[in-house]
Amino acid sequence: MTTNNDDLSQLPNIGKVLRDRLIEVGIKTATDLRTAGSENAFLSLRDVDPGACINELMALEGAVQNIRWHLLDDDRKQELREFHQLLSLNKKY
């Protein structure tokens, strides 16, 4: 059972649609998301929705850190951009 503190929708950046998609891929709680990490959660989302975008990746990282994604450290944002770019390049081949 999910406690209110472990409810995905209580995390910043996680609205109903993203919460439902995370649950669809087996990430049912905030603890599940933190354990998976933003990159692995994003990879799972891309398995069911190849159109998952960079904003979702940033939102996931913000949720993991429990902050709005706009407040992510610039270095971390750059790491996520590079990760997303690599995924985009690999998708083409």
Image (cartoon, rainbow, N blue to C red):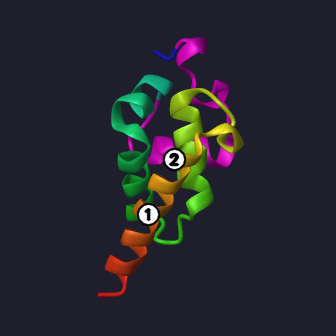
Q: Are marks 2 and 1 in contact (CB under 8 Å)?
A: no
Tell me where residue 49 appears, x and y as whole percent.
48, 66
Residue under label 1: 82
Q: Say if residue 48 shows up in the picture.
A: no
Q: Which residue is depicted at the point 70% across and 44% down?
A: 70
What percent of the width, then of the height, locates residue 23? 48, 41
Instruction: Tell me which amino acid carries mark 1.
Output: Glu
Q: Give the magenta-colored segment's residue range.
A: 3-28
Q: Nearer the viewer, mark 2 or mark 1?
A: 2
Residue closer to the observer: 26 or 62 = 62
The label on residue 70 is: none
Total number of numbered discs in the rendering: 2
Give the residue at the far left of this rendering.
93
x then y, percent, for residue 36? 35, 37
Secondary structure under tag 2 reads helix
Give the residue at x 44% y 71%.
Answer: 85
Q: Which residue is mark 2?
A: 75
